[in-house]
Image: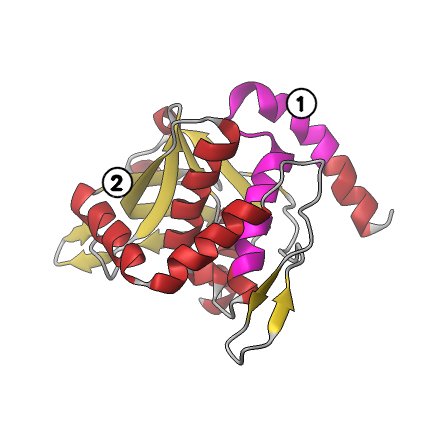
């Protein structure tokens, strides 16, 4: 079966069930992720290192296009990716795990769920860190399903520890860069709910030329 057709079948298979129990159906989650990724890539940024942008813009799109009361969280994060590989965001300070403005992860919280729009790009981080191949998956999970650090054992297990000071620092730092506001506005204007496709739109590149936006994000393969 052609790869594009297989992915289409996956979208249809996950869509009805996920729509009943998570904030966004898979197709809508994928559209938010695609738009943010595509804008970051067009601006020559590293999307898999842009959790703040994914979170702040993702929360904005959820509030404006889906009328969901999304909030921005940041702090420690631990995700089990494979039976033997864990992705950790934060740093060790003696025997403690801590997060700060330099070592953290950011995610969205809405309706009792953690929504991580950068999760499909964990595959890229894992590859950089020498881990085995990780599938690109959607992450929307109830906060009540979160594990303790010593309980994380199976793929999809996670621990998130919000730190209000870190979140405040992340938001402040984001606002200090004028280009962030410009790119956020691009995402806001360009976004369309599926099945509609985003209109044609361009942004200026670093050399002053105009780059036309296209949905270019790697496709999601399933759900965590």
Q: Is residue 13 left or right of residue 29?
A: right
**Residue nearer the viewer, 29 or 84:** 29
**Residue 82 in view of the camera:** no
- Going from N to C along the chain, the mark reached first, 2 or 1, is 1
Label 1: which secondary element: helix
* Rendering coords of residue 120 (x, y %): 54, 50
Q: Would you place residue 221 above or below residue 206 in this image? A: above
Asked whether disc 2 touches disc 1, contact meaning CB atoms under 8 Å apart, the reply is no
Q: Residues within 10 Å of mark 1 (few under 14, many from 20)?
A: few
Residue that sits furthest to the top in the current view: 20
* Magenta-span inclusion, residue 29: yes
* Rendering coords of residue 42 (x, y %): 57, 65
Q: Would you place residue 9 above or below residue 37 in this image? A: above
The residue mark sitting in front, 2 or 1, is: 1
Q: Which residues are magenta?
A: 11-39
Q: How is the image coloured?
A: secondary structure
Label 2: which secondary element: strand
* Rendering coords of residue 209 (x, y %): 59, 76
Q: Would you place residue 84 above or below residue 210 in this image? A: above
Residue on which disc 1 sits: 16
Residue on which disc 2 sits: 161
Q: Residue at x 26, y 53 (%)?
A: 170
Q: Would you place residue 208 above or below residue 7 in this image? A: below
3D distance between C-alphas at marks 2 and 1 = 30 Å
Q: Residue at x 80, y 49 (%)?
A: 4
């Amino acid at each position: 079966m052609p790869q594009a057709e297989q992915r289409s079948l996956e979208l249809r298979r996950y869509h009805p069930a996920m729509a009943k129990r998570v904030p966004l159906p898979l197709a809508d989650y994928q559209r938010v992720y695609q738009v943010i990724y595509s804008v970051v890539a067009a601006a020559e940024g590293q999307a898999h290192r842009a959790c703040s942008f994914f979170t702040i813009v993702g929360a904005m799109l959820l509030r404006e296009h889906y009328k969901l009361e999304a909030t921005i969280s940041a702090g420690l994060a631990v995700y089990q990716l494979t039976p033997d590989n864990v992705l950790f965001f934060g740093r060790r300070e003696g025997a403690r795990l801590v997060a700060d403005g330099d070592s953290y992860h950011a995610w969205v919280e809405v309706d009792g769920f953690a929504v991580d729009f950068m999760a499909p790009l964990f595959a890229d981080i894992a590859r950089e860190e020498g881990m085995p191949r990780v599938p690109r998956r959607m992450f929307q999970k109830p906060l009540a399903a979160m594990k303790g650090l010593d309980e994380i054992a199976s793929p999809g297990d996670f621990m998130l520890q919000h730190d209000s000071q870190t979140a405040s620092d992340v938001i402040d730092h984001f606002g200090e860069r004028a280009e962030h506001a410009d790119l956020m506005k691009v995402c806001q204007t360009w976004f369309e709910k599926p099945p509609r496709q985003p209109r044609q739109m361009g942004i200026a590149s670093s050399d002053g030329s105009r780059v036309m936006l296209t949905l270019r994000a790697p496709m999601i393969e399933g759900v965590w």
